Image (tube, rainbow, N blue to C red):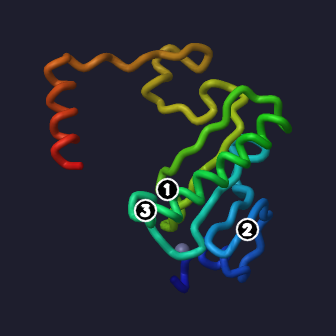
């Protein structure tokens, strides 16, 4: 993909602060970090959505993120590291790896009803609705 920022980073046409690289994947620092160390792990080939990645590639990305997370726990002395894909900003699948210093570092607004110092659970769905949702998802797998 000629106009893809992450393809250009993967090919070396645009510089990045690289953490790890092999023939298929690349890990580098996010230019807009939530926390120091916030890293992105991408496939070198252009895939837009994580759910469309070949299984081996998805596994490589997760394994790389595990190594980065273990390093982050040592370096930043954090209890947990977040791993997530959002598909926002650059249309090239990228996994975010973020050392979590605060429980709301990567939170959803749905958890913030009572502010950033506590952790609100969104309202529960009725059990019948949950059963329906689960059945719908199961049927679609
Ligand atoms: Zn790309």
N-terminal of the pair, mark 3 or mark 2, is 2
Distance between the alpha carbons at the discs numbered 1 and 2: 23 Å
- SS assignment at label 1: loop
Distance between the alpha carbons at the discs numbered 3 and 1: 10 Å
Residue 86, percent from left and from top: 48, 51
Mark sitting on residue 21: 2
**Left or right: 49 as drawn, with respect to 97:** left
Q: Residue at x 45, y 59 (%)?
A: 50
Crowding around mark 2 (Cα neighbors within 10 Å: few <14, some 14 to 19, many 20+) is: some
Residue 17, percent from left and from top: 80, 63
Residue 71 position (above or below residue 87): above
Number of numbered labels in the structure image: 3
Q: Residue at x 70, y 52 (%)?
A: 39
Ligand 1 contact, mark 1 (Cβ < 8 Å)? no
Mark sitting on residue 49: 3
Residue 133 position (above or below residue 93): above
- SS assignment at label 3: loop
**Left or right: 29 as drawn, with respect to 108:** right
Crowding around mark 1 (Cα neighbors within 10 Å: few <14, some 14 to 19, many 20+) is: few
Residue labelled with disc 1: 88
**Left or right: 104 as drawn, with respect to 93:** right
Q: Quadrant of residue 49?
A: bottom left
Specify the farthest residue to the front: 56
Residue 112 position (above or below residue 19): above
Residue 29, percent from left and from top: 74, 57
N-terminal of the pair, mark 3 or mark 1, is 3
- SS assignment at label 2: strand
Distance between the alpha carbons at the discs numbered 3 and 2: 20 Å
Crowding around mark 3 (Cα neighbors within 10 Å: few <14, some 14 to 19, many 20+) is: some
């Amino acid at each position: 993909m000629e106009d893809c920022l992450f393809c250009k980073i993967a090919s070396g046409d645009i510089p990045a602060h690289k953490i790890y690289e092999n023939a298929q994947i690349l890990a580098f620092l996010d230019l807009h970090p939530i926390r120091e160390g916030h890293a992105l792990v991408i496939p070198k080939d252009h895939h837009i959505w994580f759910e469309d990645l070949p299984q081996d590639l998805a596994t490589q990305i997760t394994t790389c993120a595990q190594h980065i997370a273990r390093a982050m726990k040592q370096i930043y002395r954090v209890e947990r590291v977040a791993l997530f894909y959002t598909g926002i900003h650059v249309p090239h699948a990228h996994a975010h790896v973020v050392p979590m210093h605060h429980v709301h570092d990567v939170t959803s607004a749905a958890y913030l009803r009572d502010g950033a110092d506590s952790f609100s659970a969104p309202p529960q769905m009725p059990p019948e609705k949950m059963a329906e949702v689960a059945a719908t998802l199961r049927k679609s797998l």
